[in-house]
Image: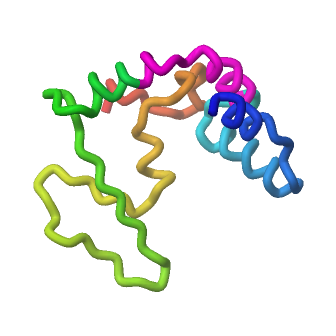
Amino acid sequence: HQAAVVAQLMEAPKTYEEESARLWHEIAGETYEFDRREQVAAVVPTVTLADVVDVVDTKLAGVATRHRLCVQIFAPTDDMHMDGEEEGATVIVDRAEFKRHLGLFPARTRISAGAIPLAKL
């Protein structure tokens, strides 16, 4: 399976639009890691079954730090709603805005001119 993941990561873009979208994603995220696929592909062969089991055991399988994830995707033509909205749930309407608040891989190394660090907000 690792070889298949690496092959998929290293597959050349089929169109200029695909390559452009990948590059603009890095620019919009202000990460500028244009070789991200190569970085991830280099790490994939080092991941062992024990690593995967450890992540499942420590992050997912009934531990106090476990978080529940529920993904509901609606077509643009549907009325968006959540059945039984739960306390503490986060409804993501704007994916780009939501992703701005997530940690980054690799960590953002440059700060945009005019950006306000979260610590000062």
Q: Is residue 33 visible?
A: no
Q: Is residue 96 magenta?
A: no
Depth order, front residue of 75/60: 60
Q: Which residues are magenta?
A: 36-52
Relative side of 20 to 99, left or right: right
Relative side of 39 to 18, left or right: left
Q: Residue at coordinates 59% horizontally, 31% vertically from top-left?
A: 112
Image quarter where the N terminus lies is top right
Q: Position of residue 86 (x, y in %)?
A: 13, 59
In the depicted structure, whether residue 21 falls above or below residue 60? below
Q: Position of residue 113 (x, y in %)?
A: 59, 31
Q: Main secondary structure of the magenta part?
A: helix
Where residue 105 sits, quadrant-wise, is top right
Where residue 82 sits, quadrant-wise, is bottom left
Relative side of 6 to 91, left or right: right
Coloring applied to the structure: rainbow
Q: Residue at coordinates 70% horizontally, 26% vertically from top-left?
A: 41
Depth order, front residue of 37/114: 37
Q: Is residue 41 visible?
A: yes
Image quarter where the C terminus lies is top left
Q: Position of residue 56 (x, y in %)?
A: 33, 29
Q: Residue at coordinates 40% horizontally, 39% vertically from top-left?
A: 101
Depth order, front residue of 3/58: 3
Relative side of 62 to 56, left or right: left
Q: Position of residue 120 (x, y in %)?
A: 33, 26
